[in-house]
Structure formats: C-alpha cells, structure tokens
Image (tube, rainbow, N blue to C red):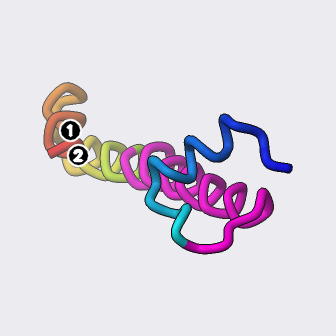
Amino acid sequence: MLDPIIILIALACGLASRAIGLPALIGYLGAGIYEELLFRLLLLSFTTWGLKRLGLSPRRSVVIAVV
C-alpha cells in the first residue's frame, strides 16, 4: 500500500490517473531535481563566469545570467 503522502503528491502532479508506483514517482521527482541542479549549478555558473571573462562586472554578469 502506498503512503498517503505519496498519493497526495501524485494527485497534485496529475499522475494519479495512471497506475503509478513508488519507483515511477521517484523517477519523476529525480528528473526534476536533476534538471534544477543542471540549470542552477552549471548553466547559471558558467554563464556568469563567461560574462565576467568578457569584462562585465560581477553584479551585471549575475543579473544578465539570471535574466
């Protein structure tokens, strides 16, 4: 039997209409976490670093990278 918290998360994600188990839910959550880490840690950091190397100020580099 699934934990009620997992069922609520599945309902909130719109996944309850499919037969979903714990492994599938973990897969969906893991993909979201991976995507956030990839974007926030890698892309944002490298973009900021590249803009600084082009001569922009650190503050302006961060603002442009975020936008």
In this view, the mark in front (1 or 2): 2
Left or right: 49 as drawn, with respect to 51 = right
Amino acid marked by disc 1? Ser
> Which of the image's four quarters has the C terminus?
top left
Amino acid marked by disc 2? Ala
Q: Quadrant of residue 49?
A: top left
Query: Residue visible at 51% across and 57% down?
Result: 35
Q: Residue furthest bottom?
A: 18
**Crowdedness of circle 1 by 10 Å Cα count: few (<14), some, many (20+)?**
some
Residue 47 belongs to magenta span = no
Q: Is residue 60 above or below residue 37?
A: above
* Residue 11 spot, x, y in % from top left: 50, 51
Residue bearing mark 1: 61
Q: Residue furthest top?
A: 59
Is 36 in front, or is 4? 4
Secondary structure beneath disc 2? helix
Residue bearing mark 2: 65
Secondary structure of the magenta portion, mostly?
helix
Residue range corresponding to the magenta coloring: 18-44
* Residue 31 spot, x, y in % from top left: 59, 61
* Residue 46 spot, x, y in % from top left: 41, 51
Is 22 in front, or is 33? 22
Q: Is residue 13 above or below residue 6?
A: below
Left or right: 38 as drawn, with respect to 19 = left
Q: Quadrant of residue 62?
A: top left
Query: Residue visible at 77% across and 40% down?
Result: 3
* Residue 5 spot, x, y in % from top left: 66, 35
Q: Are marks 1 and 2 in contact (CB under 8 Å)?
A: yes
Is 5 in front, or is 58? 5
Secondary structure beneath disc 1? helix
How far is the residue under mark 1 from the one under mark 2? Answer: 6 Å
